[in-house]
Amino acid sequence: MVFQVKVGIIGGSGLDDPDILENRVETPIKTPYGEPSDVIIQGEIKGVKCALLARHGRKHSIMPTNVNYRANIWALKSIGCTHLIVSTATGSLQEQFKPGQLVVPNDFIDRTTKRAQSFYDGGGDSPVGVCHLPMYPAFHEKTRQVLIDTARELNIDVHTKATIVTIEGPRFSSKAESLMFRQWGGDLINMTTCPEVVLAKEAGLLYGAVAIATDYDCWRDRGENVCVADVLKVFGENVSKVKSILIKSVENIAKQDWESDVCGLKQQVSEGVMGGH
Ligand code: ADE
């Protein structure tokens, strides 16, 4: 029997357009960790099963700290997703990542402070044990490669590597912080990749992201400063490219065999659990 994929798509503003799915059904889902950001819209793209979730809710009312990342990932896992492909708006910490350009990141630096990072938290409905999962590689390499190859197929330029610094927010960074993140090797900066990528891995989901660089944060000596209006403007101008990459990637994912990837990750997670049954 052919291994069936199901692709979860987590979108920022502009990507929560349900029209990208055929045969849509709205599914409200409860999880042991509470409610996801919104209903999950299930459907198909070119016959491939998909599920769509707006990370900040469809009205964009949930700030990054308050996104229930665990419920979002748990819900998508519970309906059978094998993959997660997501979009994210990011600031650029390096000259070569120009606002408006797209990036498929491969690593992260976590500067969040207030977010649950594991499903294995000792709670009554949680999986048993404590999970210590390696974070190299942070993103699923073969899924990343599909996103990169799909962008090329569509003649859309993408940077193929970047380290994202995720800050707690909701404020943006000070100049000293921004300069420090550059010294640390950060390429992009946002407020949501952590713990989403971490929890996806713990849930055994193959995770890849397409980032839009929307601004130069505040590190350049040119008097620029990141602001919401610029982020939204540049995001809006480029989101259709991301949308087409994600849609076509669903088709391309379904052309490959993922059984060993899914089984391998499941095995890695079980090896990371101490004190489980
Ligand atoms: N999202 C978009 N631009 C950002 C920035 N400069 N810092 C943090 N998150 C962002």
Image (cartoon, rainbow, N blue to C red):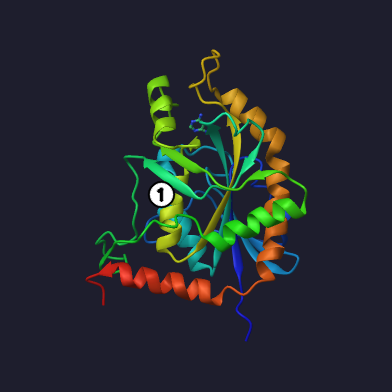
Q: Is residue 132 visible?
A: yes
Is 147 in front, or is 228?
147
- x then y, percent, for residue 138: 45, 55
- x then y, percent, for residue 135: 39, 56
Q: Residue furthest top?
A: 223
Residue at 44% x, 39% y: name it. Answer: 165
Q: Does 122 sit above or below residue 228?
A: below
Residue at 55% x, 22% y: name it. Answer: 227
- x then y, percent, for residue 143: 58, 61
Is 152 in front, or is 270?
152
Does ligand 1 reach within 8 Å of label 1's beta carbon?
A: no
Q: Is residue 18 visible?
A: no
Please tell me in which quadrant of the rendered image residue 13 appears.
top right
Residue type beneath disc 1: Pro
Please tell me in which quadrant of the rendered image residue 41 appears.
bottom right
Label total for image: 1
Q: Quadrant of the N terminus?
A: bottom right
Is 125 in front, or is 263?
263
Residue at 71% x, 51% y: name it. Answer: 151
Residue at 34% x, 57% y: name it. Answer: 118
What residue is disc 1 on?
A: 195
Q: What element does badge 1 sit on?
A: helix
Q: Badge 1 local density, few (<14 within 10 Å), some, or many (20+)?
A: some
Q: Taking 156 as reference, is 55 left or right?
A: left
Q: Taking 235 as reference, is 56 left or right?
A: left
Please tell me in which quadrant of the rendered image residue 131 appears.
bottom left
Q: Quadrant of the C terminus?
A: bottom left
- x then y, percent, for residue 124: 26, 65
Q: Residue furthest left?
A: 275
